[in-house]
Amino acid sequence: MIVLIKLSCALLGGLLMSRIAKKLDLPAVTAYLVAGLLLGPFIIGALGVPGLGFSTLADVASFDLISQAALGFIAFTIGNEFRLSQIKLMGRQAITVGILQAVITTVVVDAVLLALHFIFPSAISVSSAITLGAIAAATAPAATLMVVKQYKAEGPLTKLLLLVVAIDDAVGLVLFSVSFGIARVIETGHLSVVSVVLEPAIEIVVSLVMGGLLGGLLHLVEKFFHSRSKRLSISIAFVLLTIGLSMVTFEVGGVRVGSSLLLTAMMCGTVFCNICDTSEELMGRIDGWTAPLFVLFFVLSGAELDLSVISDPKVLLIGVLYIIFRSVGKMSGAYLSCTMTKCSTEIRRHLGITLLPQAGVALGMALEAQALSDGSVVRSVVLFSVLVYELIGPTLTKRALIAAGEIIPEGKTSARVKNAPREQINIGRKE
């Protein structure tokens, strides 16, 4: 009973806060995060009223299954962007930008935090510095996708952005595995080729193969059903199956075998959308079904934000440096890679800002990094950065897409109709 009341309060709180955000010209995803922060254990949850908010961080974590499900549907939806027509048009650019901006961000953050270590050795260890540099490469696809959907963003920047954030997960996984492996070598003096090279490679291959097979199987099973409601139910069942299978891990000869939730669900969506003729219509129906799930996901994400980390001066110092130079790395990396691949001026100017949001993937990496001698510093810094990036990132993404001309300013068109170039709207009005 209390669980249902909590979920109801979270859903209603997020939706009501979105009305306030609209008046302030802020994205709905920011409103959901703020609602979660208010309902979290540091504000309303601290009152201890049963069902009203979340009393502890462990209480929030008990709803982790909802967050995992939402991430799975988000990744499946992003897979829709990897249609062959899009890959032929922007594939080389997306791969180049996705890899280079992540690597450049890691190098920039590594250099700054290592410099901090040599100036103040007690502030951060070498192993934690290089681990944080790898975590900096990760970009959160969820907040970006929500902004794109809310404002019906459409254009070359939006298309490239969605491809890049999808590629970023695989690149971030490799960078973190290598960096964290090196960090463990520094601390233990033992080099493990298995954990540094083999396990990350296996995770990526397993994710892509399993996601591809599930996407193909979804298409085959769906052919047996003709009603829209049943085909929608089959699609939802397969996404949930994908999420569940991606959580399975086991060891073979001392080697960990597992898969990435985001990569597996993305691959499933990619294969399905490229072989199913009616995938566009189904994706639209899935979007309607998952809307409340996404609201809950972001409210829970807001409730997870740990305000206690801002009380530690060392965390604040490292966190501020991390945020500043991660932003520098993302924006400069995106600009340089876009210039190399001859992207348009609008894309070069604005893509970097849209890559700033950071959340779930980074938190997962930080949790693993707690195994380091000062891993608690890594986790606290990432928690602090997520607090900042999640609250301002969606607004920055929105403004960048408006500046690029891919979001029509509020008041110019109904949110219920598809976004279209201004010229089209003006022509329609004249007619």
Image (cartoon, rainbow, N blue to C red):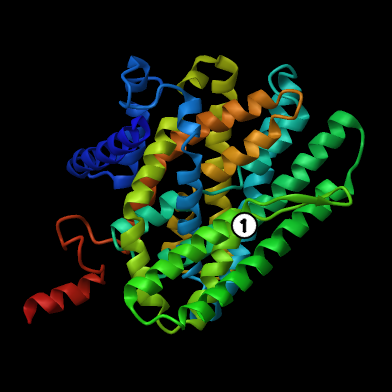
Residue drawn at the location 35% of the way across and 30% of the way down: 2
Q: Residue at x 31, y 19 (%)?
A: 49
Few, some or many residues within 10 Å of mark 1 (<14, 14–19, 20+): some
Percent x, y for residue 164?
54, 61
Identity of the residue drawn at 44% across and 57% down: 349
Question: Would residue 175 appear left or right of 363 to someone viewing this image?
Answer: right
Instruction: Give above or below for 216 relative to 16.
Output: below
Work out which quarter of the rendered image holds the C terminus and state it. Answer: bottom left
Question: In the rendered view, would you say 12 is above or below 312?
Answer: below
Coordinates of residue 188 in the picture (x, y in percent): 88, 30
Depth order, front residue of 117/302 = 302
Q: Quadrant of residue 363?
A: top right
From what the image shows, is residue 100 above or below residue 85? above
**Count of marks placed on residues:** 1
Position above or below: 260 against 119: below
Query: Of residues 424 and 47, which is closer to you in this image?
Result: 47
Q: Quadrant location of residue 134?
A: top right
Answer left or right for 76 relative to 110.
Answer: left
Left or right? Give the position of 261 relative to 389. Answer: right
Q: Secondary structure at mark 1?
A: helix
State the image coordinates of residue 130 (x, y, percent, origin top left).
73, 37
Q: Position of residue 280 (x, y in %)?
A: 38, 76
Q: Amino acid at mark 1?
A: Leu
Seen as rendered, the residue at the extreme right is 190
Q: Which residue is mark 1?
A: 245
Asked if residue 121 can be seen in this view, the reply is yes
Quarter occupied by the N terminus: top left
Q: Is residue 357 visible?
A: no
The one of 380 and 281 positioned closer to us in this rendering? 281
